[in-house]
Image: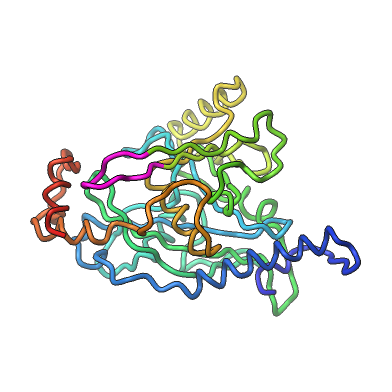
Amino acid sequence: MDFLVLQRIIDDGDDADEDDDDDDDVDDRAIDRLREYRPPPTNYDLVPLSRRAAVLVLLYADAKGDLRVVLTIRAETLRSYAGQAALPGGRADTLEETAFQTARREAREEIGLPDLNQSFPRPFSVEHLCEFPANLARTEVVVRPCVALLHSYDEETGENADPEVSLIPRLDAREVAAVFTAPFHNFLRMRDADDWGTEDPTEWYKGSWTGWHQSNWRMHQFFVPINSRSVVKPRSSSRMQKRAADELEEKEKAGEVTRYRVFGMTARILVDVARVAYGEDPEFEHNSHFGDEAMIANLRKMGRLSAVRKATDELTQETMQKAAKLS
């Protein structure tokens, strides 16, 4: 069973447990599909260092065997996308650094996940599953999604642990206001299928079409319920971060924030990865292609995405129209 050997006692004579076993198979197959996924050639390695970034789509199985994904609320003190939900990640340090190395290093800096050169507490380990086509941020940064699986079972020793108890709450998050998790399969659904005990379990997905590089573009928004089982507030490493975390917690206690909104590039990446993992289309409308490789290639032909980044760098509709005509 590999990673889904997780504290579940299966009774072959119980119909409910048989259904649960079917669910296990769904998530097992999802991980296998991601292991087998091979992305098309990427422009990521062709753009200058100043344009490279990577994010980590970190999956793990909860105590029921269901896959969940780790997300953050960026601290208000960060220079870009402050206060927004995001995947752990950031800019590349060197041209020699692979996208996966960047994603892991940034995950260590942001949420305290051990880096490639650091050991995990037993029995945890991380397996790199695959990478996805690069996405293009409005700030003209090329973002490579890297998908990984957090193993919580050691086949050699038989030791097992619950990530939501033994690891995630102990992460030393330094650049975020909160670390939270969400059911991974739900990023293909119109409704939140998990039993959160919320008053309005249907307020999960909203989407709309917009114009973006000469085509219709589906914008996704997911609203993840705030629950003590799935939200971790960081141990403060600075006065500014403590202020950001405290302000977020005050809004939650006052009822001003009851769900975290996951949208933009982060939402799109999660939808795309889930589509491959589960081998199914989402219940809502979506773009059929993954990433922005064609548009990135066209922008390079135009002389955009140069090594020198300016504070004013931001893609305009006019630039995108010109790039689209090169296709």
**Is 91 situated above or below 191?**
below
- What x and y, as percent, mark residue 158? 75, 74
Examine the residues drawn in magenta and state their main secondary structure.
Answer: strand
Q: How many marks?
A: 0
Q: Quadrant of residue 11?
A: bottom right
Q: Position of residue 142 (x, y in %)?
A: 27, 55
Q: Residue at x 53, y 28 (%)?
A: 246
Instruction: Name which residue lies at 73% across and 65% down.
Output: 22
Q: Quadrant of residue 288?
A: bottom left
Examine the structure image and report whether residue 184 is included in the region drawn in magenta. Answer: no
State whether residue 85 appears in this view.
yes
Left or right placement of residue 219 versus residue 308 in this view? right
For the N terminus, give its image quadrant.
bottom right
Does residue 129 sit above or below 255 in this rendering? Answer: below
Q: Residue furthest top?
A: 254
For residue 25, side relative to residue 86 (left or right): right
- Seen in the image, is 219 located left or right of residue 4? left
Residue furthest right in the image: 13
Classify the position of the C terminus by image quarter. Answer: bottom left
The structure residue drawn at horizontal position 53% and vertical position 64%, both measured from the top left corner, is 279
**Which colour style is shown?**
rainbow
Residue 293 to residue 80: above or below: below
Q: Is residue 122 visible?
A: no
Residue 192 in the image: state x and y as whole percent: 62, 42
What span is colored magenta in the figure? 209-219
Q: Residue sitting at 51 percent across and 32 percent down?
A: 245
Residue furthest left in the image: 303
Quadrant of the rendered image containing residue 86: top left
